[in-house]
């Protein structure tokens, strides 16, 4: 029993700039489990961006190519509960032994181990055993190792042995392609303008976008109405109000650049011109404040800056806002624009 969901396959996973590295690394691992430098492969990113889907896809592909390998997908919550049960029943040796026999271990949402020392200990031993024996470990997490808190140092250092690849928010074209894929898979057809509207207006994460699609389908069938752009707009108005809508990094960058009358490409350039540096720092600040993106991901959106640069930018903005009145009023204006959508 691998616990793999066949619909979370590579074929059903749409490729885009936001996931290219993670997808390609996953594919490389699937072709040579335990035999690449990507061990562990750690996939990280915000909620609903496809971590679980990609983790399953890798497992499914390994099963296809290497039917004799034992592959196990397990959520970290389940792993932790199993371990606690084993402790209670004094069967922790069996527990450890079971996990040490697996060829490909996929653990989803390892951030859940934060603060759980005993679970981390046992996982550390399993990890070492598997790694030493050339077995593949695949992990997902909501943050990269450098930003994980409550995790033992020795475990974090092992997470960094292999490759950490992030999943970002898909751009508009990728979102459209994902919706089309889901519709196609379920034999649904929708007018193009409706699909584009959904993809355009729900830019937080893929799960919400799918939720909107499903709500729209349910509404249409319930009221026996055709799915039109008009209906989609009404539904999104209702739907989006009910979910905490998160602005995207792209949206923040657009608003900040419009405000300072700069072309958006400047943010991603290497320019050290004062007004560009300022706009870049302000967009980093709002991206950290208003999105759930990792610092590394925010940096990547600003021309490949690292997480330390983003952190520095955020501190600079806070400091300036305390000393410079003009600067503070820019921030207040922008914050208003970003919250009223
Ligand atoms: P996470 O584990 O990061 O919270 P999931 O893997 O559960 O996110 O993905 C949420 C939904 O979005 C799933 O239905 C998944 O199939 C879909 N999804 C996310 N990214 C993609 C993608 N690139 N292509 C197709 N579907 C995707
Ligand atoms: Mg998940």
Image: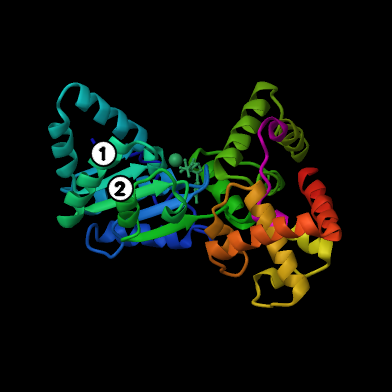
Residue 269 included in the magenta stretch of the image: no
On the question of residue 264 being in view, the answer is: no
Q: Determine which of the numbered discs, if any, sits on residue 59 in the image.
A: 2
Depth order, front residue of 309/244: 309
Q: How is the image coloured?
A: rainbow
Ligand 2 is found in which quarter of the picture?
A: top left
Q: Quadrant of the C terminus?
A: top right
Residue 248 included in the magenta stretch of the image: yes
Relative to residue 165, is residue 251 drawn left or right?
right
- What residue do we see at 52% from left, 39% from top? 187
The percent position of residue 178, horizontal first and vertical second, equals: 55, 49
Relative to residue 242, is residue 57 drawn left or right?
left
- What residue do we see at 59% from left, 35% from top? 211
Residue bounds of the magenta highlight? 239-252
Real-space Cα distance between discs 1 and 2? 8 Å
- What residue do we see at 23% from left, 48% from top? 127
Q: Determine which of the numbered discs, if any, sits on residue 2 in the image.
A: 1
């Amino acid at each position: 029993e691998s616990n793999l969901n066949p619909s979370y396959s590579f074929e059903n996973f749409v490729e885009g700039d936001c996931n290219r590295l993670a997808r390609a690394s996953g594919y490389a691992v699937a072709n040579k489990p335990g035999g690449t430098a990507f061990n562990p492969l750690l996939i990280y990113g915000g909620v609903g961006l496809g971590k679980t889907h990609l983790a399953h896809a890798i497992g499914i592909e390994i099963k296809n190519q290497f039917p004799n390998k034992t592959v196990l997908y397990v959520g970290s919550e389940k792993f932790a509960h199993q371990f606690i049960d084993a402790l209670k029943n004094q069967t922790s040796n069996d527990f450890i032994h079971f996990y040490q026999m697996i060829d490909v271990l996929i653990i989803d949402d390892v951030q859940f181990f934060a603060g759980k020392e005993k679970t981390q200990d046992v996982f550390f031993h399993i990890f070492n055993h598997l790694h030493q024996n050339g077995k593949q470990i695949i992990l997902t997490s909501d943050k990269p190792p450098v930003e994980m808190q409550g995790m033992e140092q020795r475990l974090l250092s092992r997470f960094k042995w292999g490759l950490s690849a992030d999943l970002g928010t898909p751009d508009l074209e990728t979102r459209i392609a994902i919706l089309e894929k889901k519709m196609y898979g379920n034999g649904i057809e929708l007018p193009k303008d409706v699909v584009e509207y959904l993809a355009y207006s729900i830019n937080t994460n893929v799960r919400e976008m799918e939720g909107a699609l499903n709500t729209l389908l349910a509404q249409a069938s319930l009221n026996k109405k055709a799915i039109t752009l008009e209906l989609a707009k009404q539904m999104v108005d209702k739907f989006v109000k009910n979910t905490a809508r998160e602005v995207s990094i792209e949206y923040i960058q657009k608003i900040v650049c419009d405000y300072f009358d700069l072309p958006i490409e400047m943010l991603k350039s290497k320019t050290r011109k004062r007004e560009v540096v300022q706009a870049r720092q302000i967009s980093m600040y709002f991206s950290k404040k208003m999105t759930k993106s990792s610092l590394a991901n925010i940096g990547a959106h600003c021309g490949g800056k690292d997480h330390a640069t983003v952190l520095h930018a955020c501190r600079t903005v806070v400091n300036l806002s305390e000393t410079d009145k003009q600067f503070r009023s820019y921030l207040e204006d922008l914050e208003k624009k970003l919250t009223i959508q």
